[in-house]
Amino acid sequence: MTPSPYVLVLFYSRHGSVSEMAKYIARGINKTNGMEAKVRQVPEVSDTTKVASPALPDDGAPYCTLEELAHCAGLAIGSPSYFGSMAAPLKHFIDQTSTLWLTGQLIDKPACGFTSASTLHGGQEQCIHSMMTPLLHHGMIWLGLPYKNKELISTTAGGTPYGASHLANSTHETTLTNDEKALCEAQGKRIAEMAIKLQK
């Protein structure tokens, strides 16, 4: 039996807002006939060499494997913005994908990014750029959010043409605005539809 094609929603979330965005992106994917969402996170990176992450997270989505990344039909990747860049745990995971690069397993698959920051100019767009760069090296096809999504114009919080974003008014604020939710769903729907087109 052939497994169902899926878009991998891969993220790191420190305080929960990126995890919340992943749920709405997955919802957009799952609304698309012929494609399903597989939601996965990456573990923390230890600041010592003596502590290892448990095999399973305490809560939330399971940890991602390289095999799950290799076999995805598309990739939605998310991280909080840390000084305008993706967080170290996500970068650490991506740095382990050389075998996929050598074998070209991600070439011509669609990818998109999403992020969150606690200030209006906290580097959301640059963070998305930082996630885009290694995926272009993998030969993936980057998808942003077109302005046909009117929430890009009406939003007073997150939302960029580079990818969905969230403005957290405080470090532990994880509630998305209606515009942010709509843009996350739109991004999920767009990558799912593109993944289907590219499989033909």
Image (cartoon, rainbow, N blue to C red):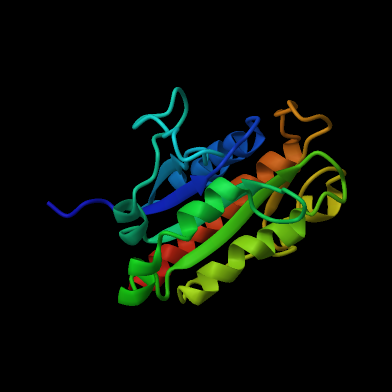
At a point 67% along the width and 59% down the height, the residue shown is 128
* Residue 136 in view (yes/no): yes
At a point 54% along the width and 46% down the height, the residue shown is 89
Q: Is residue 77 left or right of residue 108?
A: right
Give above or below for 141 relative to 171. Answer: below
Q: Quadrant of residue 73?
A: bottom left
Residue 117: image x %, image y %?
76, 43
Q: Which of 57 and 189 is in front in this view?
A: 57
Give above or below for 74 relative to 154. Answer: below
Q: How many marks?
A: 0
Q: In this view, does 157 lie to the left or right of 33?
A: right
Residue 42: image x %, image y %?
47, 42
Q: Which of 95 and 4 is in front in this view?
A: 95
Give above or below for 125 relative to 21. Answer: below
Where the C terminus falls, by quadrant? Answer: bottom left
Residue 160: image x %, image y %?
76, 57
Residue that lies at the very extreme toward the left in this rendered image: 1
Residue that lies at the very extreme toward the top in this rendered image: 58
Q: In which quarter of the image is residue 102?
A: bottom left
Q: Is residue 12 left or right of residue 1?
A: right
* Residue 188 in view (yes/no): no
At a point 65% along the width and 63% down the height, the residue shown is 130
Residue 65: image x %, image y %?
34, 48
At a point 42% along the width and 64% down the height, the residue shown is 195
Q: In which quarter of the image is residue 179?
A: top right
